[in-house]
Structure formats: C-alpha cells, structure tokens
C-alpha cells in the first residue's frame, strides 16, 4: 500500500513539473526516477553529472557541471563548468562560470583575439589554441569549485577561477572574486570576509569529519545532533571512540 502511495505521489509530481508535454523529456524522467533529481520547468542541462537528491528550480541553465548529493539551486541561475559539492544551498539568480575578458596587455578585450569559441560568429585564433588565460582552472575542466555545505544567497556572481571551500556562506548580492576559506562568511562587492561560522577547533573537526561523505541513512540516524556544533562534536567523537575500541 505504501509503495502504491509513493508511486501515485511521484506521478502527481511529474504531472505538475513536466506539463505541458514539451517539458516531459526522457533525460528528466531518468534523473527523477533513478537519482531523485527534480528539474523544474525551463531547466536547461547539458553534459552535467548529478549525484542525486537534487532540485533545480525554474529558468536555470547548468552546463558541463557536477552537482553533489543534496544540493539545490534556485531559479533564474546560470552555472557553467562548475564543480559543486554536497548539501549546498544555492540561491536564485546565481551566476557562475560566465567567462572573462583580458583586462591588461591585450590591445582588445574582444574574444575573437583570444578564444576559438566564435562568440561573435568568428575568431582570429587558429585551431583549438587560446593564448589568453586570465583565470586559473579550479579543478581540471571546471572553472569554479564550490565545496560542501556551502550557502550562497540571492543574486550572487562568482568569477572564474574561484574556489569556495566547505561550509562557507556568501551573502546576498556579493561578487566573489577571490577564494573563500572554509566556514567563513563573506559579503560585498568585491566579497570580503565578515566573520566565521565556528572557531578554529570546531572548523578543523568538521573538515576532518566530513559528515557530507556519510550515506543518507547515517545522516537520518544522527540528524538530531546537527542542531548544535558542541553536541555534534561531543556525541560523534564519543561514538567514534567507542566504535574503534570495540
């Protein structure tokens, strides 16, 4: 009976998400049924990898990116060539990986002089070589790397080459131009540190423990300890000690 109720619930969600029929795609169905990924209307995906239990809200484009378990992305966002970790809360109107133009040495900032991608319909760069690289590649083919348990507010821009570490918070309206340290809070244009979520000992513990790498069942069992960092640290340290001793 419970299985039947779950089936009916999923069917109802599908009807509400994918009607009219032009939004009812095989790729969306496959992600929904096999990975619990919900893609709302007018979501564009291209060569992305979803770990599962994700929700992507309307009018969002995600191309050539990795989305970790439990991460959701707000509406009207554009995310390209980005590696995003697990359990991230990403607000609406987020812009990541939009590209950059040379600001020094090059006579012109027009992409025809440094990019083979033909943004304007033509290029002066032969083959696949591009001499200009003002940004670094954060992680292989990704322009931006975002860690785990990161919260990014509304209308934030993250420039190419930036790495946002685990546990960080990016305030609404910020423009992130530099790397963000673990569990730090940044705000402004350009974004600057305004605080820390926890003290150094607590941050070191969380970075070492990496709760986001635990399976969903472990998180369900221990969810009551997530309400307080001291409780989380004390109880789970004791659990780990008892487990190793037995």
Image: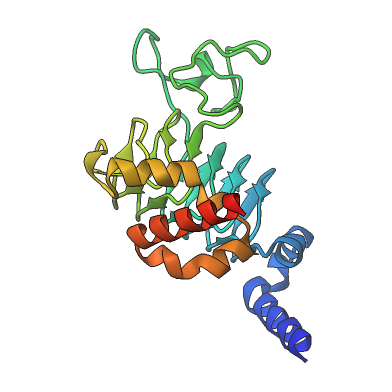
Residue 193, compared with residue 152, is above or below; it is above
Q: Residue at the spot x=63%, y=73% of the render?
A: 17
- In percent of width and height, residue 190 lies at 25, 35
Quick one: which residue is furthest to the bottom in this view?
1
Quick one: which residue is furthest to the left in this view?
194
57 with respect to 169 (left or right): right
192 with respect to 119 (left or right): left
Residue 32, compared with residue 176, is above or below; it is below
Q: Which residue occupies the foreground of this view, 118 or 37? A: 37
Q: Which residue occupies the foreground of this view, 176 or 123? A: 176
Q: Is residue 42 visible?
A: no
Q: Residue at the spot x=40%, y=47% of the render?
A: 167
Q: Which residue occupies the foreground of this view, 137 or 185? A: 185
Q: Quadrant of residue 35?
A: bottom right
Quick one: which residue is furthest to the front in this view?
246
- In percent of width and height, residue 238 lies at 47, 56
Q: Is residue 48 visible?
A: yes
Quarter of the C terminus within the rendering: bottom right
Q: Residue at the spot x=32%, y=42% of the render?
A: 201
Q: Residue at the spot x=62%, y=12% of the render?
A: 129
Tell me how many marks there are.
Answer: 0
- In percent of width and height, residue 5 lies at 72, 88
Residue 166, compared with residue 32, is above or below; it is above
Quarter of the N terminus within the rendering: bottom right
22 with respect to 147 (left or right): right
- In percent of width and height, residue 198 lies at 29, 49
Q: How is the image coloured?
A: rainbow
């Amino acid at each position: 009976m419970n299985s039947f109720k779950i089936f009916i619930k999923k069917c109802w969600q599908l009807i509400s998400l994918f009607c009219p029929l032009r939004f009812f795609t095989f790729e969306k169905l496959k992600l929904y049924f096999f990975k619990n990924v919900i893609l709302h209307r007018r979501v564009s995906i291209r060569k992305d990898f979803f770990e599962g239990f994700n929700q992507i809200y309307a009018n969002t484009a995600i191309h050539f990116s990795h989305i970790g378990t439990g991460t959701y992305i707000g509406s009207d966002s554009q995310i390209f060539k980005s590696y995003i970790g697990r359990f991230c809360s990403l607000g609406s109107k987020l812009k990541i990986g939009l590209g950059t133009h040379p600001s020094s040495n090059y006579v012109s900032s027009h992409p025809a002089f440094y990019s083979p991608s033909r943004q304007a319909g033509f290029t002066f760069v032969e083959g696949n070589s591009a001499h200009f690289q003002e940004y670094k590649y954060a992680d292989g083919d990704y322009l931006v790397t975002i860690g785990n348990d990161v919260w990014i507010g509304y209308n934030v821009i993250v420039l190419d080459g930036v790495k946002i570490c685990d546990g960080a918070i990016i305030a609404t309206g910020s423009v992130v131009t530099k790397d963000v340290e673990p569990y730090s809070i940044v705000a402004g244009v350009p974004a600057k540190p305004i605080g820390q979520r926890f003290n150094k000992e607590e941050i070191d513990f969380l970075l070492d423990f990496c709760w986001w790498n635990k399976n969903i069942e472990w998180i369900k069992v221990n969810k009551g300890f997530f309400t307080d960092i001291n409780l989380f640290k004390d109880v789970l340290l004791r659990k780990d000690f008892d487990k190793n001793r037995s």
